[in-house]
Image (cartoon, rainbow, N blue to C red):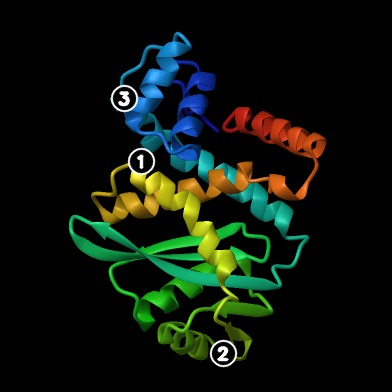
């Protein structure tokens, strides 16, 4: 594979740091520029925009492929599906999200509607990459029931008032990033950024409230080391 950094004067370490700071944390382009200036790295905020657009999808694809390979040994016995409203240029759009029983984001899909065709496309995309789950928890949206009936796994659907809180909580990091970015301008950008953000969030999410401090520090160090080796 050709070196993706071959035409850039900046080091790969700086590019990885910039992409991680912008995608992982709720920072604006100019926030990243100011923080890097304190470290002696002089770049423009437009450079931050260019780098995350250029390298973000490549980084996310490599992280996602490695995680999918590792997770094949485990069974996604429960999926949680939900959709959130995202306003683009004054028009309402929808971001469909799927997480597993541990809160890891499996798939994101942006659409202009939340009818049966959109739900069916989302379900097929999810099942193509991650197979099938034993239980699928959703809200009361009828598009889920219609699409799952057509696929043939309607008996796996579970609807409950508070049963889908796992997916509802997974929206919070994305909402924080959306506010920092002052919303999105195009649906393509929404789709692109949601996939990148999901991969980076999964990579650095260690559920620190469930483990001891020593275990968390070891997991954080391992995640950072793996990130520094992305596209190496």
Nearer the observer, 68 or 90: 90
CA separation in Å, label 2 and label 3:
48 Å
Placement of 217 over or under 84, stated as above or below: above
Q: Classify 10 Å Cα crowding around label 1: few (below 14), some (14-19), many (20 and above).
A: some
Tag 1 secondary structure: helix
Judge whether residue 127 can be spotted in this image.
Answer: no
Rendering coords of residue 198 (x, y %): 51, 51
Say the numbered circle drawn on residue 45: 3
Position of the N terminus, as image quadrant, is: top right
| Residue 91 x, y percent position in the rendering | 20, 63
Mark 1–mark 2 Cα distance, whole angstroms, equals 38 Å
Q: Which mark is residue 154?
A: 2
Residue bearing mark 1: 180
- Of the 4 image quadrants, the one containing the C terminus is top right
Which residue is found at the position 45% from the left and 71% from the top? 122
Residue at disc 3, secondary structure: helix
Using the image, tell me which numbered label, if any, was put on residue 208. none
Query: For the point 39% across and 50% down, which residue is it?
Result: 192
Q: Earlier in the sequence, mark 3 or mark 1?
A: 3
Residue 140 locus on image (x, y percent): 46, 84
Residue 75 appears in view: yes
Q: Are marks 3 and 1 in contact (CB under 8 Å)?
A: no
> Which residue is farthest top?
40
């Amino acid at each position: 594979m050709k070196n993706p950094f071959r035409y850039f004067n900046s080091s790969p370490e700086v590019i990885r740091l910039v992409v991680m700071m912008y995608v992982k944390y709720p920072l604006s382009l100019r926030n990243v520029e100011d923080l890097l200036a304190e470290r002696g790295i002089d770049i423009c905020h437009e450079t931050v925009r260019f780098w995350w657009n250029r390298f973000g999808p490549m980084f996310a694809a490599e992280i996602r492929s490695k995680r999918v390979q590792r997770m094949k040994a485990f069974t996604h016995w429960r999926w949680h599906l939900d959709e959130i409203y995202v306003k683009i240029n004054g028009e309402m759009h929808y971001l469909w999200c799927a997480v597993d029983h541990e809160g890891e984001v499996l798939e994101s899909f942006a659409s202009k509607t939340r009818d049966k065709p959109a739900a069916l496309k989302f379900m097929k995309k999810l099942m193509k990459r991650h197979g099938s789950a034993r239980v699928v928890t959703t809200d009361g949206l009828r598009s889920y029931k219609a699409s799952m009936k057509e696929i043939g796994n309607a008996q796996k659907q579970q609807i409950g008032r508070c049963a889908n809180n796992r997916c509802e909580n997974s929206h919070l990091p994305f909402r924080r990033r959306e506010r920092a970015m002052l919303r999105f301008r195009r649906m393509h950008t929404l789709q692109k950024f949601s996939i990148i953000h999901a991969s980076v969030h999964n990579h650095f999410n260690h559920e620190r409230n469930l483990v001891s401090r020593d275990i968390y520090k070891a997991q954080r160090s391992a995640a950072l080391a793996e990130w520094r080796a992305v596209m190496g």
